[in-house]
Image (cartoon, rainbow, N blue to C red):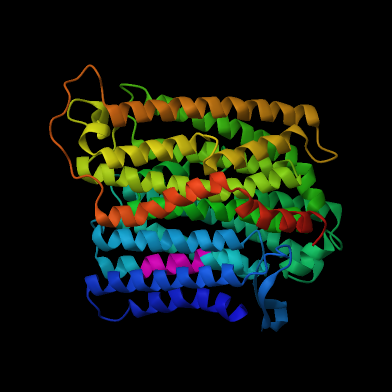
Amino acid sequence: MNAVLIALLALPLLGAALTLAPIGDRRALRLGTAVTGGTLLLAVALAAGFDHGDPGRMQAVTDVSWIPALDVRLHLGTDGISLPLLVLTALLTFLCALYSLKQLPAGPGGRAFTGLLLLLETGMLATFAVLDLVLFFLAFEIVLIPMYFLIARWGSGRKAAAANRFILYTLLGSAVMLLGFLLIGVQAGTFDMVRLAAAHGGGLSHTTQLIAALAILVGLAVKAPAWPLHSWLPDAHTAAPTAGSVLLAGVMLKMGTYGLVRVLLPIVPDGTATFAPYLGAFAAVGIVYGSLACLALARKGAKGDLKRLIAYSSVGHMGFVLLGIASLTPAGLNGALFANIAHGLITGLLFFVVGAVKDRYGTADLDTLAGATGAALYGRAPRIGALLAFAAVASLGLPGLAGFWGELLAMYGAFDPAAGLSRPAFLTYMVLAGLGTLLTAGYLLVVVKRVCAGDPKQPAPVAVLPDLQGHEAASWTPLAALTLLAGLWPALLLGLSDPAVKHLLGGG
């Protein structure tokens, strides 16, 4: 299985290199679809060959020396925490390539677009597969350049400014994170994440753990994104092409929260416990803030952009992930990891549907979509309207769909946090998170009412727009089906994550 994991990383990198050859745009797009499809098959094979009876053990391991002078190793592996993220990344990238085959955004051309998409996939997959802090940092950085160009060259609106803000925030965050990694490596004598996790803070003084934890926390919080370091996200989502928005929300935000679980908790446990109450506070504020921002954008006359609204909703939803992590409990961490996957599926579907609505109307402005010339999707494109409504109710946490379990477990973790954490403080965070769920339901139901039903005071639109197309159905149906499956069968994910979480918390 280690050969499968290596091939999983090598195939999209090889595909990106092939796009440097002078092939036509259409051939490049077909190549991208074939390569991402092959990568998805490898991810499924990795999941099928995974020992589900022992998900807490690192599997498919490759561990060879890379830079002996610094003890940097080419160390790869996967467990019950990273495996679902690897499969999610491969799935979303394939669906984006499939969608772009028929719906390529306006820009320089298909060959460059495909090359950047495959390079982006390589970096995202590597982030979840590497087990060395130096390699983790390199994989973390690889994704920035492709996403920058996807926004700057294939985006819309103020795309240059949004791309610049994205790269500035994330590079600064990464630089701070690197300082923490270097401090750990110098003090512990190794960058190997498995050995550092097994030591569980051994060999690192309390002061070292505090400084390293703060640096890593700040760096990863930018990517998560945690309030108040989130301000790059709405602009990036609003300007990004559909495929860029799907991968940014569905995968790249998860890189930050995955790093918190994989690096921060097991390697610097004392520093993490010190800053956990502050992380919980910022998470709770982010949940309420994101929901209030969405309510402001959804109200009539606000000229709110629907893509921007979904971006702010991600701030709130990722707040639940951060709250679960901050609780330092198995229940909270399992909820955070479940919410990671659920958010990737649901928000990926939302950005696909909203991208299609914007392509049809030429705008994502809510007032325009709700007016006489606007959407009223139930009457004009009923299948798209039904999918938008489905994704919205999944996002608000309807029981039976994927969005429910992660948020429930995150709040349960806050209800009974780990020993040493202030229970009254975390109960306050839980109450704020509960308020956030009510506000989330409010703004999403307003969006569904306005976009799908239209404005009842305006004449009903008579023009029928193109409804769900074949390539759209192929790209969106898997996400809807998996959202339902994860909601009805949560043990599919929790059975993988729970033993791995307990292994990490115990110093594994």
Q: Residue at x 26, y 55 (%)?
A: 470
Does residue 151 appear anywhere in the picture? no
Question: Of 85 and 390, which appears nearest the observer?
Answer: 390
In the shown orientation, is residue 260 left or right of residue 314?
right
Residue 447 at x, y percent in the picture: 37, 29
In the image, is residue 116 part of the stretch drawn in magenta?
yes
Q: Place residue 457 in its image quadrant.
A: top left
Residue ID at (55%, 45%): 488
Question: Would residue 166 be found to the left or right of residue 270 on screen?
Answer: left
Is 253 above or below relative to 316?
Answer: below
**Is residue 161 shown in magenta?**
no
Residue at figure coordinates x 79%, y 71% from the top left: 189
Q: In this view, does 170 lie above or below 30?
A: above
**The N terminus lies in which quarter of the figure?**
bottom right
Q: Quarter of the image for the C terminus: give it.
A: bottom right
Residue 324, can we see it? yes
Q: Position of residue 277 (x, y in %)?
A: 74, 37
Q: Is the magenta stretch mostly helix, strand or loop?
A: helix
Pinpoint residue 354: horizontal percent, then vertical percent: 33, 42
Question: Foreground: 201 or 366?
Answer: 366
Q: How many marks?
A: 0
**Magenta region: which residues?**
115-124
In-image side of 230 versus 427 (left or right): left
Q: Quadrant of residue 495?
A: bottom right
* x then y, percent, for residue 423: 79, 31
